[in-house]
């Protein structure tokens, strides 16, 4: 079987099952797991599949992938992005971290910071930062989204409006070519918009997979962001737009010392 035929059949299996695994496909096609990893990488580059730990899933434009899959996706890149961002967060500041596995990686990167106040609508972020005795943690209230520990809704928005913080670090589910930050949950979008309004400076942390995804709800534009941390160069037109907006872009390389 040629690679083109195998790629076609992998997509058929993915549409049928919703998810494919490296081990299962290797057995099905009687090829090595390394071959399947290359195939899945090619399909991910084409936007046909979304790579997750141990396999791949179908990309969606209306529903986010599961929390566990999101956490396993591009872990090294998220860690590198988080370390880069953490270096630009000074001791003695207040900041908001929103819902997202990359902001959770940032929380881990802040465990050595001193005299910081972190506000969050992400219970996972709060639980991570418990291990930093020099961090004051404020969890804003709201409707609990059980799938990922996020707090959303009107109560969350109203609580955030009571604060003015030095910086906000947000993530998003997708990025359009024109620089729009997108998400799947309209309630989460409203919370993120409020976070940006209440911050003196705003950072975005998002790995390159967000450029291959589509989501229906608009948070805002990269023009509203002071600094964008990612792991791959932006498309030329978007890079030019960011320069015009004054949005600084920090590109890190996963696996390299930051």
Image (cartoon, grey):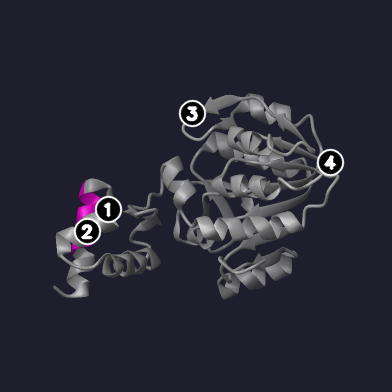
* Mark 3, residue position: 146
**Residue 206 vs residue 101, the one in the foreground:** 101
Residue 105 is situated, as x and y percent measured from the top left of the image, at 60, 49
- Crowding at label 2, few (<14), some or many (≥20) Cα neighbours within 10 Å? many
**Residue 149 vs residue 240, the one in the foreground:** 149
Question: Sequence-wise, which precedes: disc 4 or disc 3?
Answer: 4
Q: Do the CB atoms of the residues marked 2 and 3 lie less than 8 Å apart?
A: no
- Crowding at label 1, few (<14), some or many (≥20) Cα neighbours within 10 Å? many
| Residue 5 sits inside the magenta stretch | no
Mark identifier at residue 25 = 2
* Mark 1, residue position: 20
Which secondary structure lies at badge 3?
loop
Measure the alpha-carbon separation of dots 2 and 3: 32 Å
Residue 54 is situated, as x and y percent measured from the top left of the image, at 35, 54
Residue 114 relative to residue 27: left or right: right
Measure the alpha-carbon separation of dots 1 and 4: 45 Å
Write down the region rendered in magenta. 9-16
* Mark 4, residue position: 115
**Residue 77 vs residue 181, the one in the foreground:** 77
Q: From the image, give the main secondary structure of the stretch colored magenta.
A: helix
Question: Sequence-wise, which precedes: disc 3 or disc 1?
Answer: 1
Question: Sequence-wise, which precedes: disc 2 or disc 4?
Answer: 2
Residue at (49% x, 57% y) in the render: 74
Measure the alpha-carbon separation of dots 1 and 2: 7 Å
Q: Give the quarter of the image for residue 154.
A: top right
Residue 210 relative to residue 93: left or right: left
Residue 7 is situated, as x and y percent measured from the top left of the image, at 23, 67
């Amino acid at each position: 079987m040629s690679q083109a035929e195998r790629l076609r059949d992998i997509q058929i299996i993915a549409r049928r099952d919703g998810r494919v695994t490296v081990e299962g496909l290797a057995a099905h096609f009687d090829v090595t797991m390394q071959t399947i990893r290359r195939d899945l990488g090619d399909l991910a580059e084409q936007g046909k599949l979304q790579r997750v730990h141990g396999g791949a899933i179908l990309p969606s434009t209306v529903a986010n992938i599961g929390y566990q899959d999101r956490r396993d996706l591009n872990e090294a890149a998220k860690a590198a992005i988080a370390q880069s961002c953490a270096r630009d967060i000074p001791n003695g500041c207040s900041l908001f971290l929103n819902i997202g596995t990359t902001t959770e990686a940032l929380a881990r990167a802040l465990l050595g910071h001193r005299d910081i106040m972190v506000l969050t609508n992400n219970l996972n972020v709060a639980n991570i930062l418990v291990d930093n005795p020099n961090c004051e943690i404020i969890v804003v209230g709201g409707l609990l989204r059980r799938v990922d520990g996020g707090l959303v809704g009107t109560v969350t928005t109203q609580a955030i409006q009571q604060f003015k913080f030095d910086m906000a670090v947000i993530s998003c589910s997708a990025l359009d070519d024109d620089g729009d930050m997108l998400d799947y949950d309209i309630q989460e979008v409203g919370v993120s918009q409020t976070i940006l309004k209440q911050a003196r400076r705003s950072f975005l942390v998002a790995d390159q997979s967000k450029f291959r995804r589509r989501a229906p709800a608009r948070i805002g534009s990269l023009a509203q962001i002071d600094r964008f941390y990612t792991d791959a160069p932006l498309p030329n037109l978007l890079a030019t737009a960011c320069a015009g907006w004054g949005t600084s872009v920090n590109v890190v390389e996963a696996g390299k010392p930051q």
